[in-house]
Image: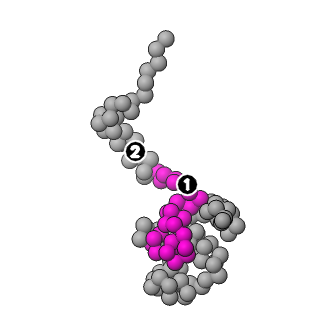
Amino acid sequence: MVSFKELLDELGAGAATPSESVRLFRKGLGMTLKEVEEVTGIRESHLSAIENGKIEMTQHYAEVFAAAFGLHPTAFLYPRGEFKKSKELESIERRAKKYITRARPDTKPKKRTG
């Protein structure tokens, strides 16, 4: 059985975005937008907007495409199995750090002695 990463490599996914992954898997299966519309019930124009990154990949869409293409939803949420934090998420983490540390003091960096 081919691994998920091998399948991505075979389809030329490289560092594909979630939207690009939809197009790669659709084309890899030889499906047209019209055929995906027939399977998913999502209008062809809407599918095109998703593939072109004009509509954000949500958990719902990831689950729909996963069912349509025989994959796991993470194939579309986290292409190549990697989670890349946006600048917004990194900023949220920085702001939240003091609260996390306060709530879980064991997460503070340990001071070295000696």
User: Which numbered circle lies on residue 94?
Assistant: none
x, y percent for residue 28: 65, 75
Q: Nearer the viewer, mark 2 or mark 1?
A: 1
Residue drawn at (51%, 54%) of the image: 83
x, y percent for residue 101: 34, 34
Q: Name the foreground residue: 64 vs 108.
A: 64
Membership of 71 in magenta stretch: yes
* Amino acid type at mark 2: Glu
Secondary structure beneath dot 1 equals: loop
Residue 74 makes an appearance in the image: yes
Marks 2,1: beta carbons within 8 A? no
Looking at the image, residue 11 sits to the left or right of residue 71; the answer is: right
Binning the other alpha carbons within 10 Å of mark 1 as few (below 14), some (14 to 19) or many (20 upward) gives few
Identify the residue at the far front of this view.
1
x, y percent for residue 72: 51, 66
Colour scheme in the image?
Answer: one colour
| Residue where numbered disc 2 is placed | 93
Q: Quadrant of the N terminus?
A: bottom right
* Amino acid type at mark 1: Glu
The magenta stretch is: 61-87
Residue drawn at (29%, 36%) of the image: 103
Q: For the stretch drawn in magenta, what is the main secondary structure? A: helix
| Residue where numbered disc 1 is placed | 82
